[in-house]
Image (cartoon, helix red, strand yellow):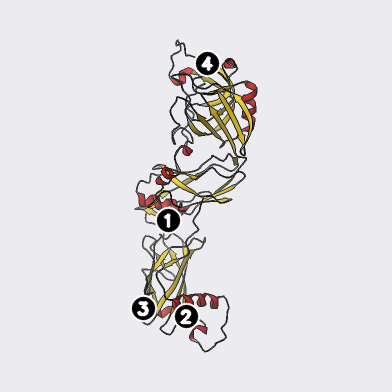
Amino acid sequence: MSHTADSRGAAAGPRTPAAVGCTLLVIALGAGATSCDSGHPLAAEPYDATDRISFSGSVGPGKKADPDQPLEVVAKDSDGRITDVTVHDATGRYVAGELAADGSRWHSTSPLAADARYTVRVSTENQDGAPGRKVLTFDTGRPLTKKRLDVDLGPGKGTYGVGRPVTAELNRPVRDRAQRAVVERALKVDSTPAVQGAWHWVNDRELHYRPKEYWPAHATVRVRSNLAGIKVGDRLWGGTAEPLEFSTGDRVEALTDAAAHWMKVYKNGKEVRTIPVTTGKPGFETRNGIKVVLGKERFVRMRSSTLGIAEDSAESYDLPVHFATRVTWSGEYVHAAPWSEGSQGSANVSHGCTGMSTGNAKWFFENIREGDVVKVVNSRGETMTPFGNGFGDWNLSWRKWRQGSALTTGDPDGPAPAGRAGLRPQSR
């Protein structure tokens, strides 16, 4: 995953070598540096540039600036130019901006937050190259409306398998691509070690974030939202969100070959157990593809009626099931199936779940965690859907995943920019 650091102010236009040198010297002087040539104009302390620049709108001490309007800084003196502008709020969020090539004007390109305090630092130089500086603090007002976009980040605190994506659930729909881009830029994901990753819009209210590959084993993942007070769209402003941090455990992958009737379990790339299994029989084939463990239940009562099977049908069942590891919300599990031990390793006789002996199911249950990867190959069933029935996110190629980001432009193979609705029917 790659992550983009908060922008530090101006994205300057072309400068001459002399201008760049002046800017660097202004910064150095501000840190207390001195020059051997005390007679050179660049060696002087920066002059007060208050009379040389102007700010847009109601920006200034004792005023409330409109957060709905961009910030603009203009050089009033034709004999001088702006060389650098940085703007940040009291929480440390920087505002991105663009500086005209001739240094006559700077304007913000990312939105200001509402009800926030900002500090602006402007560096200038006159026609002789002497540096100037202006530091201004101003407040923004509150939005006229209270329509707020809140974000619920997941998963919760804890340790998960390497396949668990980050989720962001919104309390309001966001359909416009430009507004989605504002939301994405504000949602920050960092990991140690760092890996390349991207957000993907599942629907108007939900985003998932995953790396290009699985998370590294024993990684730390930190997620936060910088959306508070930021204008997302007309009458829609970002709300607060609780940051989260979680870790990953060992890289555990269970690979089931439905045609061979065997499951191989790997830990950090090493095979640790081979288990005879049975999967879905004709008409009830187990889904192919990558699934992520959603949870574990020591006991589940599985009834065929939840799948729409009539009670008087030959396919009807009502069974107590132990050591059940859930991989879809629609009821697909890996579980103990003592009634089918004669077929395990040789035939597929289940209604879609992966069945194994009680001893093997107990071992699997005790050595698997939420977020671990379960992959099925060579089944005659359909492929696991990416969304809506658990975490099938890894069944999308990286290219298609990137296409679901509002920040992806050009080649989606290039570098990345910076729900659950209740339990459903069970199969066995």
Q: Are marks 2 and 3 in contact (CB under 8 Å)?
A: no
Residue picked out by circle 4? 318
Q: Position of residue 58 (x, y in %)?
A: 38, 68
> What is the three-letter code of the residue carrying label 1?
Ile
Q: CA distance from mark 1 to mark 3?
A: 30 Å
Q: Which residue matches tag 3? A: 76
Question: Amino acid type of disc 2?
Answer: Pro
Residue 219 seen from this side: yes
Q: State the residue at coordinates (49%, 81%).
A: 46
Crowding near the residue tagged with mark 1, few <14, some 14–19, many ≥20 C-alpha atoms within 10 Å: many
**246 displayed left or right of 143:** right
- Closest to the camera, between mark 4 and mark 1, is 4
Residue 131's disc number: 2
x then y, percent, for residue 343: 56, 16
Q: Earlier in the sequence, mark 1 or mark 3?
A: 3
Residue type of the residue flagged with mark 3: Lys
Along the viewing direction, whichever of 100 and 47 lies nearer the viewer: 100
